[in-house]
Structure formats: structure tokens, C-alpha cells
Amino acid sequence: MITVEQIKAARALLDWTQDDLAAAASLSKPSINTLERRIANPKMETLTSIQKALEKAGVEFTDGPGVKLKTTVLKTQVWEGDDSLVRLVHDIFETLVNTDKELMIAGIAEDKYETIGGENIKALVEKRVKHGIKTKLLSCEGDTNFLEPISHYRWISKELFSKTPWYVYDNKYAIFLWGPPKKVVLIENAEIAECYRQQFTALWNMAKPSKKK
């Protein structure tokens, strides 16, 4: 559990007052003041709330008594070959399972996906649906190929439909290149993911509910 020294140091890194910390942690300023002056032993729930608030603001608590600001994460991976799409769908599941975070895919073309990934893709999609992972899929207007519940899909106009599929999930953004060779470019960065999440949301709001034949 974090210490008083770490709390003070974290506030200093963020240039936060006790009022700022109290607001972020949903606590009162007297509670923060009492804790930092060591007038009373803090409750575990209080320390947990403070730690979560500071971590959300970008503070990282290191081994021992240290604190530091988190550096921006930017990781890039490239998967190439016939199994690249299957690897991406597997990563989506492992990243989102048991979370309330959402998957967004623009440029979905289920007939092509099924041809490329075969039973592996179908099995992973069924597994994702079974686990209740929130999903929004933008397909081209008129496309009636559905691997998932139709409520997951919306139709986007042909003019706005992306022939290069792209994905947003958690802090990850990925694109799938049909090739040859088939290739997935995966970027892990919160700012980039949020940028494309906003773009997807704008497209989703313009799209129409999909329909069966």
C-alpha cells in the first residue's frame, strides 16, 4: 500500500493541491489533510481511492518509496502471413475478456474474413460473443454476411466504407492489409487509440442499422 511520503511526492509531481487530490479521489480535503499530517491512521479504502486517483492521473508507484510519472507507451508490432488475422482476433479477445471495454471495427467484410481465417476465425468470434464482449462493426451498406448478432452491425455508405479494415480496442489500434502478403500492423498507444475511437464513433452515429435479406 502507498505511503504518506508517496502521496505527497505524487501531488508534487502533478502540481496538485490537497483540494485537487480530494476531488479526484472523491474524498474530503480534511481527510487528505489529516492523512498527510499523520493525525490518524488512514483506512485501507481511503488509501486505495487515493492510489487509483493518482494512477489515473499518470503517476506510477515504483518499488520501494518512489514515484514517477508514467511515460507515454508506444509499441508497434507487425504480423505477416496467412495467420496474421487470426492472431489479431485472438489478441482482441485476450485484451478485452473480463473487461467492460469495447471493440470497434471499421471496414468489416465477414465473407472475406471467413475465407481467410476459416474455422479459426469463426471459433474466436463465437468465443468473443459468448463472453459478452461489447462490439460495434461497420460494414458496407447492403452487406448481409453476419458472423455475429445483427445488433453488432451498422451499414456505412459505400463512399465512407473503408476497404482497409481497422480496429480499436482498449489502448490499441490495428489495421489489416489484404496483401499479398497479408499483414496486421498493431499500435499500442492510448492517444492514437482514442483518436480513432472518436472517428469510429462519428461514423457509427451516421451509419444505419443493418438488415437481413
Image: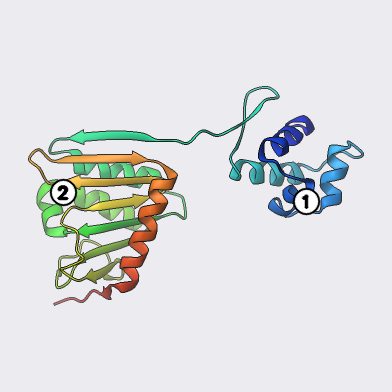
Q: Which color scheme does this rendered protein use?
A: rainbow
Q: Which mark is residue 90?
A: none
Compared to 58, does 5 lie above or below? above
Where residue 190 sits in the image (x, y, percent)? 44, 45
Q: CA distance from mark 1 to mark 2?
A: 56 Å
Q: Secondary structure at mark 1?
A: helix
Q: Name the residue tied to disc 1.
A: 19
Q: Position of residue 86 (x, y in %)?
A: 21, 43
210 or 59, which is in the foreground? 59
Residue 146 screen position, x and y as percent: 19, 65
Q: Classify 177 as above or below 71.
A: below
Which amino acid lies under the numbered mark 2 shown in the image of this protein?
Glu
Q: Earlier in the sequence, mark 1 or mark 2?
A: 1
Q: Amino acid at mark 1?
A: Asp
When asked about the image quadrant of residue 126, the answer is bottom left
Q: Position of residue 202 (x, y in %)?
A: 35, 66
Q: Is residue 18 left or right of residue 78?
A: right
Q: Which mark is residue 119?
A: 2
Residue located farthest toward the front when viewing the structure as drawn: 15
Indicate the quadrant where residue 42 lies. Answer: top right
